[in-house]
Image (cartoon, rainbow, N blue to C red):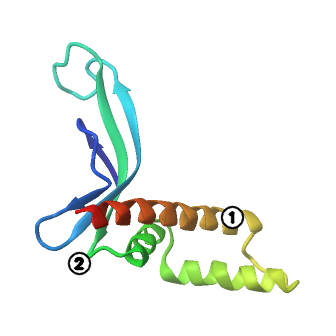
Amino acid sequence: MKTYSDERPNVLLPLNDGNYHVNFNISEETMPVGMLGDEQEEPRTQFVYETVFIEGVPTKEKIITAIIRQHYTESKESALNRDKTLRDSGVSTLTTEKQYSDYAAVVSKGNEVANLAMSKYNQE
């Protein structure tokens, strides 16, 4: 889920109910005058980022899975992995190498975010 904020978000945000948000792909954008529908008189910096919900205590596995689920259903993920295995065995599949590469990039990003979030969690 894409989220906007005037303040830089924490990577790991406790929701005070035992659950967490993990924020990632954080970037700054300068919003032109009047772009936000308010009466701002000068450009304003805003943070744009993606958020996933983590139920209960965050773990690396939960974070990676949440990020993957934001892009792929369980059945699509299984199909991509199955087709990759078949392709590696020389069998023709409906999934392209690019589709698997895109999936692998999401998994890699999930791993990167999970490592960062867990380092923040372990500092609490």
Instruction: Give how far across and how far down residue 104 sits, in percent.
Output: 63, 67
Badge 1 local density, few (<14 within 10 Å), some, or many (20+)?
few
Farthest residue to the top: give it. Answer: 41
Query: Which residue appears at 57% of the width and 64% of the height?
Result: 108
Farthest residue to the right: give it. Answer: 90
Q: Are marks 1 and 2 in contact (CB under 8 Å)?
A: no
Q: Nearer the viewer, residue 100 or 109?
A: 109
Q: CA distance from mark 1 to mark 2?
A: 31 Å
Q: Which mark is residue 56?
A: 2
- Asked if residue 112 lies left or right of residue 34, the reply is right
Instruction: Give how far across and how far down residue 98 sits, in percent.
Output: 72, 62
Which of the two discs, 1 and 2, labels the residue nearer the N terminus? Answer: 2
Q: How many marks?
A: 2
Relative to 104, does residue 40 appear above or below in the rendering?
Answer: above
Callout 2 amino acid: Gly
**Image quarter of residue 69:** bottom left
Farthest residue to the left: give it. Answer: 16
Query: Which residue appears at 44% of the width and 60% of the height?
Result: 113
Badge 2 local density, few (<14 within 10 Å), some, or many (20+)?
few
Mark 2 lies on a secondary structure that is loop
Instruction: Give how far across and how far down residue 47 sits, in percent.
Output: 32, 38
Q: Which mark is residue 118?
A: none
Q: Nearer the viewer, mark 1 or mark 2?
A: 2
Residue pointed to by mark 1:
101
Relative to 38, does residue 123 appear above or below in the rendering?
Answer: below
Callout 1 amino acid: Ser
Q: Nearer the viewer, residue 3 or 58?
A: 58
Q: Quadrant of the C terminus?
A: bottom left
